[in-house]
Image (spheres, rainbow, N blue to C red):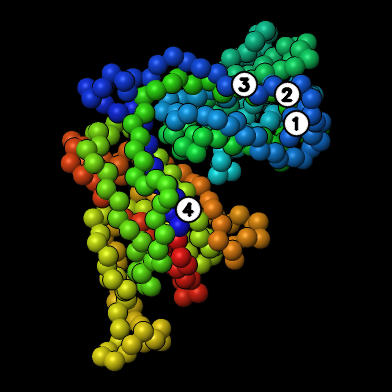
Amino acid sequence: EVQDVAVGEEGAPRKRSDMCEPGESVTVALRPVTESGSFNIPLKRPWTHYFAIPNLPEICTDATLTVLAKGELAGEGTYVGVLGEEANMLGRLFVTAGDFSEDSQACKGEENCKAGPARGGNQSVYMAEEVVASASVLEDSLVISRGRMVQYAADGTLKVGLFVEGDSVVPEVTVVGMRLSFRLGGCYSKRLLGFPGLSRKPDRYSGFVTTLALHDPPAPDDAAAILVNATSNLDPAANELVVAFNALASPGTFGPEFRLEGPGAGGSRSKIEVTGQEWDLAVAGRFFTKSYNDGRTLEPTTRIEAEVVPRSTLAAGVGEGAGGTVQLAVLLQANGEGGGQPDL
């Protein structure tokens, strides 16, 4: 059962509506006073913990993530790594002056060194050791890009991972708080399917479920996110849900990829052959492709997941000039011979 499909686009063109302009800046803060989740608990190396910032609106601007922590964060090789929702590296926090930098001499004698990182991506502002040593609670920040925030906030909750392992030698860290700062507004969004959703068995081989219409979208000027809320036996080893820009009516049982070997072959799987043809699909996103390792893959399970649609893909699917109607096909496709299409 597909309960919900929503499309949210970053920064609709200014000419369409002044309401699409980002407005005031806001900050959402988590600062528990006692032990709560992974907050205010001494974490001994090595560790990785995910933290959730709930009740977020749609976010279509860059956001600043600030982490407050205590620990032995001064010295060579000390940092706290930051992971996105897909375990991708977002950057490093609490990097001491000169660490991971080829231009460490630029930091000599500076009270607050601001030499940029020579490698490693979105690293934070470097801190001189005396600044670190003099503070009981340290705070450091990094910027999460617009494209990632559209994806991460699509389900209303940002889940960010912190870790100390590998070449980070911090023996112990206590995370005491977290803040997320961003600007409100600037989003175009459309709910394509609402409660109670659509429930059906996908076509046997093609995996076709339905086609949804997006009417009169604005011209895209940045990336977008597609969020899918679905209930099914979603097993990434056997199947994946695909959303594509394509005005498909039902392609029937087989689609272009399969056909019966001959007359009278019936529905026997042994009589089905591969045609060698492929779908003419402009894939916008592939969902539920990663294993959850929660022991529930054999039971119908509700999942919510968002995927980023790059601007180039969005422009090809929606059109540079926008307007009109855009069709989004939904398919639950089998992976390999052992895959299958359960009810969705």
Q: Which image quadrant for residue 321?
A: top left
Amino acid type of the residue that numbered disc 2 sits on in the rendered structure:
Pro
| Residue 116 in view in this figure | no
Q: Which residue is mark 2?
A: 32
Disc tally is 4
Amino acid type of the residue that numbered disc 3 sits on in the rendered structure:
Ala
**In this view, 73 is above or below 321:** above
Separation of marks 3 and 1 at Cα, in angstroms: 14 Å
**In this view, 303 is above or below 237:** above
Residue 36 circle label: 1
Q: Are marks 1 and 2 in contact (CB under 8 Å)?
A: yes
At x 30% / y 67%, what residue is drawn?
278
Separation of marks 1 and 2 at Cα, in angstroms: 7 Å
SS at mark 3?
A: strand
In the visual, does 197 lie left or right of 67? left
Q: Nearer the viewer, mark 4 or mark 3?
A: 4
SS at mark 4?
A: strand
Q: Quadrant of the C terminus?
A: bottom left
Separation of marks 2 and 3 at Cα, in angstroms: 10 Å
**In this view, 234 is above or below 306:** below
At x 45% / y 68%, what residue is drawn?
341
